[in-house]
Image: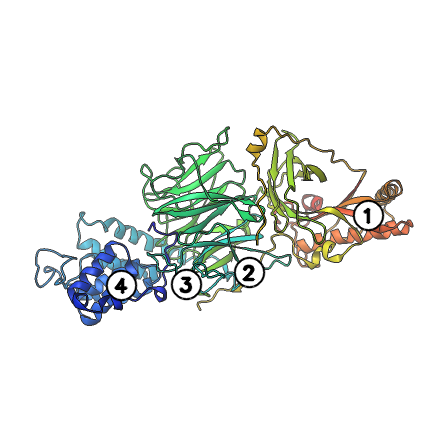
């Protein structure tokens, strides 16, 4: 299926074929029979099914017509559920020893007089039972097919594989996982197919593929010849400060009359990887975010793309390895997972498979690499698949090999296809699409909450907002430089123009300098150390281009009234029922070519204060000696400079808190309490607190995963604090 990304089809949008049969020979049985066969050969199964349905109504006991109708429904894009009764009837009417009243030598699919069904009907009936979850009946048909055929039949291997998969399904269904599945809701999902979700690392952007009619109706009536629906297009939705998805918007790169579909997005959110249907030769492209627009898609280099089919891929967070799917020759069978690595000159290496521990003689697809660079999710019809594609996970080993894949289990996986599964950075929520659960349209986007043991380890995500002054927009020249202080390596990150969101992946056990600049002038800088902890942690940091007064609007400073970047949506229970002109964008490699170097600024402060808390504590004692010394420095800066700037950082460990509900709330409360105590202390010294300006704030939940050992205060205590810095 190489014409479109998902090739979903709605029978309601198909042009009726009745008009074609209006007169002459087109009304004869023979003409319809031959036309139905032609459409089958062209894989236009829905259109072919319309013809076979008419002929079955004329000859309801014709085994051949029932088989062809069931076969087309089974291979259609959205009518598989209709296949079973016709395959059942064809199998019951099929006779052995004589394949037709006119023909005793063999089955002839192109002969209108043929009334018998081929032996393959038993295999496809087995598949129809299998997809429906009727495993015993599926086994019966698979065994029947194997017993009456020899090695010349191409479906024998698939029938044997079907028996293996039904055994896998029984085992997995006997041990269901406690997954909670939710629909993303009607803001995202429509009455049209919505699928292949991509969630940005910061959790604030959701890209997906849809076949909906655009708001401006530019694609109205322009249908895909194969699917009979509007062409696949890419939409995006962003979360607001309350954590709610906003109305999806089409990307500016969608091309009416051609397929464009989501594949993946880079960790910094600046590069989108997409699939484009190039006259059936599907290829992988990349597009850069420039301001609020996406650049024209560019074909990925090296031999990532070939004359074979490359439908999917994923870039590691460090940007140095790209994994992708291809059905090129030389693999292990069907579609395999390949990889290329970044060479010193910035180009991609030649492609190599990732080996036969992950790749199988069957198909692999939908590869996704978690931001930690070590965890892979992919779909496969091999391994211990339940039926079609199942979702698996594998871990990168120290020697560069991949571990034996693990099936995510039931009910995420089923005897039908599950593909295109992605997770949040913390590994606790997965996004996927399904047309089996029920919802608003033929396919909807869902999320599943995953158990605590699947939380990502060894990953620190720095994310937040860069906030311009009220009534202004973020300058295009805003950029964040992150310097590894041990090696001097510098990486650059651009915030998203529309809302100032930025995201950085920080390897642990290192000290970094953060340098936020506008027009190459530092507006905030600080040094941070990422602890050598194995648990997932986030550093949420808000930077103000113009520092705001600490006594200013609560809507800016009081984070508990808003949501931290990437807060998770609630969803709905799953049921069965005029643009800116792009500015110049320079990559890291281009900056080096221009000879531009980054000088790390001085990130020192005049004074720093740290308060470490017991569990569920958040207050600061005004009489504390260290606190008084810090206030002395703040007052001295006000006397000397007429103002002081402040950075506030608060943290909570991962030990659960009933008092504050969540650790995120406890961390924000500690931060806000420190702000209030600072105001009180400065005012008590007779100074105007309005001249204290907040340069940056951030709240964290960090440290090792909680193991029920709250008594181990040495283990968790160092992550329960508030820190203030002034200069």
Q: Earlier in the sequence, mark 1 or mark 2?
A: 2
Instruction: Residue 692: give its label.
Output: 1
Mark closer to the chain start, 4 or 2: 4
Task: State left or right for residue 684 relative to residue 355.
Answer: right
Give me the C-alpha separation between circle 1 and circle 2.
Answer: 38 Å
Relative image position of residue 432 (x, y in whole percent)? 47, 55
The numbered mark at residue 353 is none
Q: Name the residue under label 4.
A: 49
Tag 1–tag 2 contact (CB < 8 Å): no
For label 1, the crowd category at 10 Å Cα-Cα, with few meaning under 14, some 14 to 19 and many 20 or more, is many
- What crowding class fits label 4: few (fewer than 14 Cα within 10 Å), some (14-19), or many (20 or more)? many
Would you place residue 538 above or below residue 178 in this image?
above
Pointer 2 residue: 247
Q: Residue at (49%, 41%) from the top-left corner?
A: 315
Q: Position of residue 486 (x, y in %)?
A: 65, 30
Residue 238 picture quarter: bottom right
Placement of 168 over or under 297, stated as above or below: below
Nearer-N-terminus badge (1/3): 3
Tag 1 secondary structure: strand
Residue 442 — which label?
Answer: 3
């Amino acid at each position: 299926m190489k014409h479109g990304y998902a090739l979903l089809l709605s029978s309601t949008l198909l042009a009726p074929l009745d008009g074609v049969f209006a007169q002459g020979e087109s009304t004869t049985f023979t003409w319809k029979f031959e036309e139905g066969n032609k459409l089958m050969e062209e894989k236009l199964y829905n259109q072919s099914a319309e013809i076979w349905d008419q002929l079955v109504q004329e000859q309801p006991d014709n085994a051949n017509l029932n088989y062809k109708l069931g076969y087309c429904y089974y291979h259609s894009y959205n009518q598989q559920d209709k296949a079973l009764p016709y395959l059942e009837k064809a199998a019951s009417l099929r006779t052995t020893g004589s394949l037709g009243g006119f023909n005793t030598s063999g089955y002839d699919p192109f002969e209108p007089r043929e009334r018998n069904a081929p032996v393959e009907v038993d295999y496809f009936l087995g598949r129809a039972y299998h997809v429906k979850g009727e495993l015993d009946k599926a086994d019966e048909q698979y065994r029947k097919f194997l017993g009456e055929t020899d090695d010349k039949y191409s479906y024998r291997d698939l029938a044997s594989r079907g028996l293996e998969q039904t055994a896998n399904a029984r085992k997995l269904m006997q041990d269901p996982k406690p997954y909670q599945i939710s629909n993303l809701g009607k803001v995202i999902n429509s009455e049209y197919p919505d699928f292949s979700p991509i969630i940005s690392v910061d959790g604030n952007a959701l890209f997906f593929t849809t076949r909906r009619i655009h708001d401006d109706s530019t694609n109205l009536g322009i249908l895909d010849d194969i699917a009979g629906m509007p062409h696949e297009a890419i939409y995006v939705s962003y979360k607001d400060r309350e954590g709610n998805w906003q109305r999806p918007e089409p990307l500016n790169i969608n091309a009416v009359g051609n397929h464009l579909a989501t594949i993946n997005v880079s960790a910094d959110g600046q590069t989108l990887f997409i699939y484009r249907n190039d006259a059936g030769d599907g290829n992988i492209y990349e597009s850069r975010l420039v301001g609020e627009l996406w650049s024209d898609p560019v074909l990925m280099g090296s031999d990532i793309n070939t004359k074979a089919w490359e439908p999917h891929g994923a870039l590691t967070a460090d940007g140095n390895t790209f994994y992708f799917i291809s059905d090129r020759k030389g693999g292990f069978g069907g579609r395999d997972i390949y990889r290329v690595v970044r060479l010193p000159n910035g180009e991609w290496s030649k492609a190599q498979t990732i080996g036969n521990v992950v790749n199988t003689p069957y198909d692999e697809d939908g590869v996704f690499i978690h931001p930690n660079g070590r965890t892979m999710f992919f779909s496969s019809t091999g391994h211990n698949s339940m039926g079609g594609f199942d979702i698996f996970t594998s871990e990168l080993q120290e020697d560069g090999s991949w571990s034996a894949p693990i099936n995510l289990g039931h009910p995420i996986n089923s005897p039908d296809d599950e593909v295109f599964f992605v997770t949040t950075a913390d590994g606790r929520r997965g996004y996927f699409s399904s047309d089996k659960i029920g919802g608003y349209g033929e396919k909807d986007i869902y999320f599943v909450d995953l158990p605590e043991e699947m939380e990502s380890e060894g990953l620190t995500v720095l994310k937040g907002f860069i906030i311009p002054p009220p009534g202004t927009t973020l300058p295009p020249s805003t950029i964040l430089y992150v310097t590894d202080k041990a090696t001097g390596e510098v990486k650059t990150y651009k915030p998203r123009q529309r809302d100032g969101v930025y995201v950085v992946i920080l390897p642990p056990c290192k000290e970094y300098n953060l340098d936020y600049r506008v027009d190459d002038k530092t507006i905030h800088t600080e040094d941070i150390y990422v602890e050598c902890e194995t648990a997932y942690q986030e550093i949420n940091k808000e930077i103000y281009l113009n520092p705001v007064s600490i006594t200013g609007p609560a809507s800016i400073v009081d984070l508990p009234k808003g949501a931290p970047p990437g807060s998770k949506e609630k969803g709905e229970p799953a049921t069965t029922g005029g643009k800116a002109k792009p500015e110049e964008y320079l990559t890291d490699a281009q900056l080096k070519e221009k000879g531009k170097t980054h000088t790390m600024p001085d990130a020192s402060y005049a004074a720093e204060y740290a308060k470490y808390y017991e569990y569920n504590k958040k207050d600061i004692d005004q009489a504390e000696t260290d606190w008084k010394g810090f206030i002395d420095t703040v007052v001295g800066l006000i006397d000397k400079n007429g103002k002081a700037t402040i950075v506030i950082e608060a943290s909570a460990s991962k030990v659960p808190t009933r008092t504050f509900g969540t650790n995120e709330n406890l961390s924000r409360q500690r931060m806000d309490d420190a702000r209030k105590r600072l105001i009180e202390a400065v005012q008590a010294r007779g100074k105007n607190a309005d001249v204290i300006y907040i340069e940056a704030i951030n709240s964290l939940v960090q440290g090792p995963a909680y193991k029920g050992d709250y008594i181990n205060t040495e283990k968790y205590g160092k992550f329960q604090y508030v820190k203030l810095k002034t200069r």
